[in-house]
Image: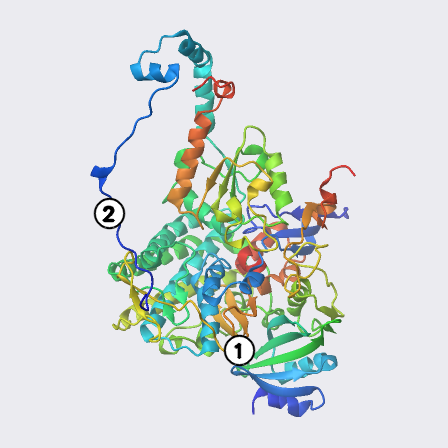
Amino acid sequence: MNAAEELKALLPGSVISTGLQLNKPMAVIKKEDLLKAAGKAKDIGFDHLSVITGIDYKDHFEVIYNFFSYSKKQNLALKVNLDHDKPEVETLTSLWNGADWLERETFDLVGIKFIGHPNLIRILLPDGWNGHPLRKDYDMNTEQFVTIGENGDDVVSPDGTNLLRRK
Amino acid sequence: MESDELFINMGPVHPSTHGVARFKLRMDGENIKECTPVIGYLHRGTEKIGEMKTYLQFIPYTDRLDYISAFPNNYAFVKAVEELAGIEVPLRAEYIRVLTMELNRIINHIVSIGSLLMDLGAATMIMWGFRERENALQLFEMLCGARMTFNYIKPGGVREDIPDGFMPKLNEFLKDMEKRIDDYEQLINGNEIFHMRMKNIGVINAKDAVNYGWTGPTLRGSGVDYDLRKYEPYSIYPDLDFKVCVRNEGDSYARFIVRMDEMKESLHILRQVVDNMPASKEISSAEYGIAPMTGTPTGVSTYFPRIFTPPAGEVYSRIEAPKGELGFYVVSDGTTKPYRVKIRSPSFCNLTAIPSLVKGLKIGDLIAAFGTIDVVLGDVDR
Amino acid sequence: MEKGGFRVDPVTIDTTKIKITKKQPVTALDKLNDTGLISTVLAAREREGMILFSTIDQVFNWARLSSLWPVTSGLACCAIEMMAVAMAHHDIARFGMEIFRASPRQADLMFVAGTVTKRMAPRVKQLYEMMPDPKWVIAVGGCASTGGPYHESYSVLKGVDLIIPVDVYIPGCPPRPEAWIYGVIQLREKIKNQGYGAKWGLNK
């Protein structure tokens, strides 16, 4: 029996459905039980978190976690569905250290908040950027002006007021 | 003697940071108390561009991710698309693909070792290394016309066939490369200063490495015996015979030696590919035609259909790139453009462990440890 | 068209059919140039400036163009071609660029090689302002000239000439080392024609 069905047998309340991600077993998890399901997956032997993907479908968000097990050489994918108005889910940094930057990147580009993350700030775009670019309703024509503030950090403004040297 | 804390910024413009990476260091004298990497100075929005271009138009953008070795990037995206659409690839095309990818692995490790040694102060290795790199780049130019950004591997096969003068020149390159790798080992491996700067610097054990999501030669330097080409093989790797290079110490010197060994294994793989290359002339899937085109070395070129629509679905496929595990998550909704392309790059995931790796060391050790992790900023920032 | 790619036919040019037309001389100077005699007052006054300033200008310009020291500001893929140009096969040290200085205070040429993003732009401008006069800038590659393949992206500056003045643009993605050296030679030609004479319009 493949890994998704194994997970369903262990946690029947959390798993909504099992299926296939083309050829890898995938399980859809309830939003509130993600940490429990991921912990159980780590116990079964899935110790490598490969990637965290955030996708913006126009009426809901999806976050997909891909795991891999070095000992059993098997793949597993977990999917979580989130509301469009309030995309929040628990963080996995307590189990995997590598999830830290992957979640920061998903927050930066797609706009999904991870509850409990120690340092959820933007990582690829400067602090203060307006909007989340990978959402489908991001306006590509918004102007963003970037200058250097104190300490070498960036200051962003949408109208260029930070470009004046004297205020 | 207690002194005040010093706050040093190893800025985006720095000769040793391999591009535009920035470190914010809090120091106590010469020892590092805390190190925060700041990235994003090369963020070009490749994933958003992926939603605006068709599948075939996106392939040149994958070249520019890890620009030192561009063939594996092409192949990772094309493998995802082929799995989604269910395309069969002929055998000769697979052999040509593996030939180019392994050649790229060799020159990637040359640049990595060369720039590490240049940061440590020894400029000879990079001069020697770039001499070999020129020979390899001339081979690539014969094959597909470009030196660094190839756009050669497409869904269903490759773009053009191998021209006539290629095989003799490749054999000459292989013979030459063996002698040169022995030269490099003699120059570096026994050097006492090198040992002092690299041994016991940046130590990480196997469990922590897996927890941080490390993959590739950095993981194999910590003792975990895993290589995607051997244990989850793709393309023609099941028929090839090669070893997986593993070291157990987990420090910078071990990661360096893993890369030297991998170069020799790549030469071994290349010799097998050259010996067993099938003689048929099919370089792409039978449903695409071959069109005569003047100006190419062989007079023919593959015709890839401009309207290419894989069925709706999602796929995550990963390969063993020279820097680690490169994965593409492609979501398709049945139209000509992908709905979402997510790139899992090895340099981004390897870089998360730097703060814990260099606590308590000096700045020179930060440079040595950072050099062995082999980061390319095009891959980190995408 | 049948199922196939596009057909590229070899082009033949019949050079016997090309006629070279000459412009008819209009001004006095043109007529003078036709005859080959340069002895009128007008022409002599033009050459006056050249005689006064020519040798000093030539010496300064020769000194400046033979020893341009670049600053290492390689940002992306074009930086790897910069390393290839600086290494033994295509050697840029024979044109005087012996050392790539790490500090901009000691350099007088800046190769902007790679994509300039909006986050990196203030730093590139600061680097330019830190270089002392006389200084020149070469924009290498498609991304630094106009934004390149990333023109539609949300975070890429569409050409570095929006923030600093550029002297030579080298197209390519990435440009071959031979094209790089051609761009450097163009910059040397530009420097050769500089000086007081040229500024006052006298050094024709």
Relative to A154, say whether A64 is above or below: below
Judged from the image, the secondary structure of the residue bearing numbered disc 1 is loop
Measured in 3D between alpha carbons, the distance from the residue under mark 2 to the one under mark 1, in whole angstroms, is 49 Å
Q: Is residue C190 visible?
A: yes
Residue at image mark 2 = C12
Does B185 sit left or right of B316 as displayed? left
Observer-nearest of A71 and C85:
C85
Q: Residues within 10 Å of mark 1 (few under 14, many from 20)?
A: some
Answer yes or no: are tags 2 and 1 on the same subunit: no
Which label belongs to residue B235?
Answer: none
Query: Which of labels 2 and 1 is toward the front?
Result: 2
Which label belongs to residue B312?
Answer: 1
Q: Amino acid at mark 2?
A: Thr
Circle count:
2
- The picture places residue C192, in percent across and down from the top left corner, at 44, 26
Mark 2 chain: C
